[in-house]
Amino acid sequence: MTTLLVRDVMTIGVPICRDTEPCGVAAARLLRQSVPCDVIVALDEDGIATGWLMREALLRQNPARIVGEAMDEEIPEVPPDIPAEAAAHMMRDKGVEYLFLMHSWPGEPRPSAVVSLKAIEKCLAELARSA
């Protein structure tokens, strides 16, 4: 049996916004994008990841509030080559629905991909049914 890895279920490309943008502007952008995730990563003026928000949290904010004031500054990370089941356990332990794959070239962290608990659970269930 083949082990399902994070890289097998991750979504490449992460919605982004500036940490200085109003929440209403960032929410509108996230709603317009056709990516299968409900998160957005905030970047500073140098393009460095400074935090993240789930769509629901973003929509609950006053539209004029600045993203940097509302975001979670701790970006939960995961490497691409660990078993997806282990990543799911990490998400449950941390109480998050998403983990981010970050690349640090040239030097500072930027989001490259995201994996959701729902996607992992769906793939694991499909594998179990086909076994």
Image: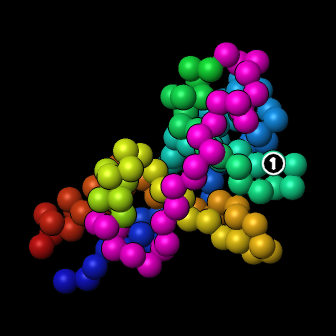
In the displayed structure image, the side of residue 45 where residue 16 appears, left or right? left
* Up-down relation of residue 18 to residue 104 (above or below): above
Residue shown at the point (67%, 16%) measured from the top left: 62
For the C terminus, the quadrant is bottom left
> Which residue corresponds to mark 1?
44
Its colouring scheme is rainbow
Q: Position of residue 101 (x, y in %)?
A: 56, 65
Q: Position of residue 73 (x, y in %)?
A: 63, 45
Residue shown at the point (54%, 28%) measured from the top left: 57
Residue 68 lies in the magenta stretch: yes
Residue shown at the point (35%, 59%) measured from the top left: 90
The count of marks equals 1
**Quadrant position of residue 124:** bottom left
Please indicate, yes or no, whether residue 3 appears anywhere in the rendered image.
yes
Q: Amino acid at mark 1?
A: Asp
For the N terminus, the quadrant is bottom left
User: Between residues 117 and 51, which one lies in front from this camera angle?
Assistant: 51
Residue 65 lies in the magenta stretch: yes
Q: Which residues are magenta?
A: 62-86
**Quadrant position of residue 55:** top right
Please indicate, yes or no, whether residue 8 appears anywhere in the rendered image.
no
